[in-house]
Amino acid sequence: ENHILGNLPLYGKKVMITAGPTYEAIDPVRFIGNHSSGKMGFELAKTAANLGAEVILISGPTNQLLQHSAVNINHVISAQDMYEQAHTHFKDVNIAICAAAVADYRPKEVALQKIKKDDNTLNIELEKTKDILASLGAIKTDQFLVGFALETNNELEHAKGKLKRKNLNLIVLNSLNDKGAGFKSDTNKVTLINADENITEFVLKSKADVAQDIFNEILNRLHA
Ligand code: CTP
Ligand code: CA
């Protein structure tokens, strides 16, 4: 056994992370997606691995690359794929972080052939996807469960609502109001709210540093 690794704070722990967007098929050549880069989730995976954890990273389509012997990347496309992979691994992990920007809706029917241009308008009926994070919160035993909240208004109130409703130990509120924060950028401005509703607001910083702040809070909570 490696006695240097053994000194790391997450040594022997398993961490699951969801990252990136999901793509919901409309027809064989089109999908509904979003601008999530996957950067935050990949930074979290790297940070967890560097803290000694074994990491399963379930990622939607992104350009992110990560080579780390302790990180297993599981590539998925749709919210349904991500849901199934998350549930396959959740029971074996100590910490789960849902950082993915999962599509809230998907086309109710996927056309088997490319949809041809016809009328001036086209309606596509959408149905809700499964909420992966909420479904994990509903079955959680002793896992430490972390979610994100992307809000543009009544931020704290909405984030606290998600923390409670989804049965989380910690929620990371992403402020989109600040320039340099959010989907495509390398920086983020976050506020952490834990299950006791202790609120910690952080300054704008790199996503790598935000990942470190999140794991500092997780480690404090695990040892509390
Ligand atoms: N999430 C998820 N599965 C979904 C939707 C969201 O796992 N189908 C997770 C996200 O990964 C994130 C958290 O739920 O950790 C909150 O996502 P967010 O989009 O902010 O909230 P929603 O609950 O989807 O509500 P809304 O978009 O209406 O604010
Ligand atoms: Ca959403």
Image (spheres, rainbow, N blue to C red):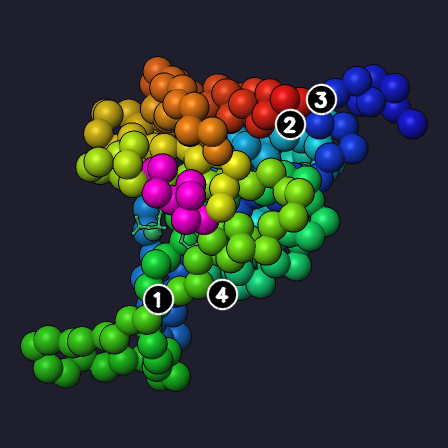
Q: Which residue is mark 4?
A: 80
User: Residue 55 location in percent, x, y?
Assistant: 67, 39
On screen, residue 57 above or below 211: below
Mark 3 Cα within 10 Å, few/some/many (few <14, many 20+)?
Answer: some
Q: Which residue is mark 1?
A: 128
Verify CB contact (< 8 Å) between mark 3 and mark 4. no
User: Residue 175 location in percent, x, y?
Assistant: 29, 30
Residue interval drawn in magenta: 159-166
For the residues marked 1 and 2, what is the alpha-carbon distance in whole angstroms? 34 Å
Q: Earlier in the sequence, mark 1 or mark 2?
A: 1
Task: Give the secondary structure at mark 4.
Answer: helix
Q: Which residue is mark 2?
A: 222
Residue farthest to the front?
Answer: 196
Identified by mark 3, the residue type is Pro
Q: Residue at x 29, y 40 (%)?
A: 158
Left or right, 125 with respect to 85, comes to: left
In magenta segment, residue 160: yes
Q: Earlier in the sequence, mark 3 or mark 4?
A: 3
Q: Residue at x 42, y 29 (%)?
A: 197
Q: Earlier in the sequence, mark 1 or mark 3?
A: 3
On screen, residue 203 above or below 189: above
Verify CB contact (< 8 Å) between mark 3 and mark 2. no
Q: Earlier in the sequence, mark 1 or mark 4?
A: 4
Left or right, 196 with respect to 17, comes to: left
The quarter in which the C terminus is drawn is top right
Q: Nearer the viewer, mark 3 or mark 4?
A: 3
